[in-house]
Amino acid sequence: MPQMMPLNWMMLFLYFLLIFYLFNINLYFNNNIKKKDIPSKEYKFKLNWKW
């Protein structure tokens, strides 16, 4: 049982990191749209490239 604990903590940590990363990407794109008027084609291309 003790050997399983680090793995579980690692998975939890990675899971939260992933959520945080995706949330930051979303905020980044929203801020970019508000700051500059990006053409829809360019925005879609960037979004596809990021994801």
Image: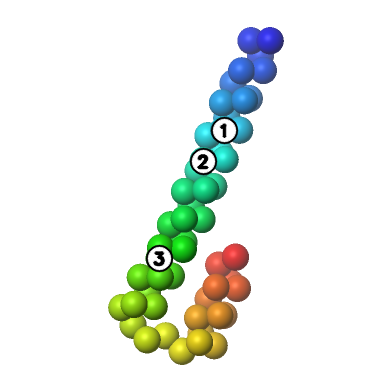
Residue receiving disc 1? 12
- Which residue is located at x 60 percent, y 65 percent? 51
The tag earlier along the polypeptide, 1 or 3, is: 1
Tell me which amino acid carries mark 1.
Leu
| Residue where numbered disc 3 is placed | 28
Q: Measured from the top left, where is residue 37 in percent x and y?
A: 37, 86
Name the side, left or right, on which 43 lies relative to 11: left
Q: The disc labelled 3 sits on which kind of residue?
A: Tyr
Which element carries disc 3, helix, strand or loop?
helix
Residue 36 location (% of width, % of height):
33, 82
Specify few, some or many for label 1: CA neighbours under 10 Å numbering under 14, 14-19, or 20 or more. few
Q: CA distance from mark 2 to mark 3?
A: 18 Å
Q: Does residue 45 lie above or below 28 as drawn?
A: below
Query: Outermost residue toward the left?
Result: 35
- Earlier-in-chain disc, 2 versus 3: 2
> Where is residue 49 shown, x and y percent of the image?
58, 72
Check disc 2 and give the amino acid type: Phe
Secondary structure under the numbered disc 2 in the rendered image: helix
Horizontal side of 4 relative to 33 (left or right) equals: right
Q: Which residue is mark 2?
A: 16
Decide: is 5 above or below 33.
above
Please say if the residues under marks 2 and 1 sit with CB atoms less than 8 Å apart: yes
Residue 47 picture location, percent across and down: 55, 73
Instruction: For the residues labelled 2 and 3, say whether their Cβ atoms are less than 8 Å apart.
Output: no
**Alpha-carbon span between mark 1 and mark 3:** 24 Å
